[in-house]
Image (tube, rainbow, N blue to C red):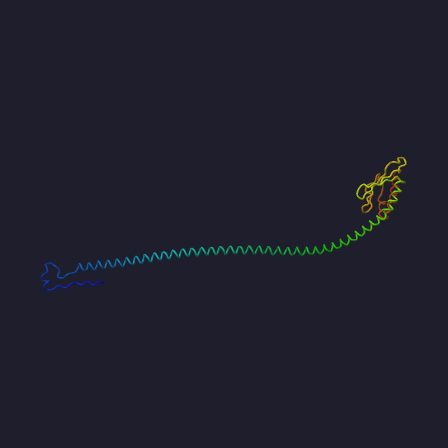
Amino acid sequence: MATIIFPKLSLKESLNRAPGAPAFELGFEAFQDKMVAFTEAIDAYVLREKEAISQSAAQHTAAVRNLHAEKEDTEARIEDARAREREMLENIEAERHHLTGLTASVGRLHSQLNKLREQGSTLDGELSGVRREVGVERATKERQVKILSDMGGADETQLAILEGALGLKIAGVADGRLLFTFTLIDSAKPYREFCFVLDVKDEYAVPLCDPPIATGELVAQLNADRDLGAFVRRVRAAFVAHAAR
């Protein structure tokens, strides 16, 4: 706090002072100057402090803004990381389900493969059996062909005789089928034709006969003895019996 100093007056100055004038000098001018200087100093101090406070406030505001921006950026990065984590977990779960499905599919495929292997083993056994049966059948057919070939020459000779004596004509009508046509059967109509078709491909069979007669037992006997000449004679006899009715 400033101290006010009042000047002292001498005796002569006191005697010569004007009536009604103060007995001492107050020094208002010097006081006023000091007060102005003091006020200016206070104002300068207040201005500096205001500027410092304003600068500090601006720095604080900038710092708060930066912190807020950093906080928002950090929160955004955290949310992005959480989103990536959720996506990754969803992908892992989807992969887990997919893997479970693949494992089940592989299990089913293994089961089917084992069944196919078992079926393959069974089929291999059956195929071996079929091959054996085919071999036996082929051998049987070869023997039958040989027998038929051996009998063919004798049959041809017998048939040539029968054709002239019995009024018989033989012609091929299809693959493995022969048409036998008789005349001289019906004494009333010597040129009336009696015919039948003989199938000679595998077992002998008579698919067509005109006029119809019972040929079942005759064909069975032919397949048993393989005597074609005797079969033709028996069929002619059956035709003769039929014509005599």
Q: Could you tell me residue 85's position as x and y percent?
A: 50, 56
Q: Which quadrant would residue 65 be assigned to in this image?
A: bottom left
Please say if 192 is above or below 95. above
Nearest to the observer: residue 206 or residue 227: 227
Q: What count of labels does the image hold?
A: 0
Left or right of 102 in this view: 76 = left
What residue occupies the far top of the structure in this picture? 188
Nearest to the observer: residue 226 or residue 30: 226
Q: Could you tell me residue 116's position as x and y percent?
A: 68, 55
Quadrant (top left, top right, bottom left, bottom right) of the C terminus = top right
Q: Could you tell me residue 200's position as x and y percent?
A: 82, 45
Nearest to the observer: residue 150 or residue 200: 150
Quadrant (top left, top right, bottom left, bottom right) of the N terminus = bottom left
Left or right of 185 in this view: 133 = left
Left or right of 127 in this view: 221 = right
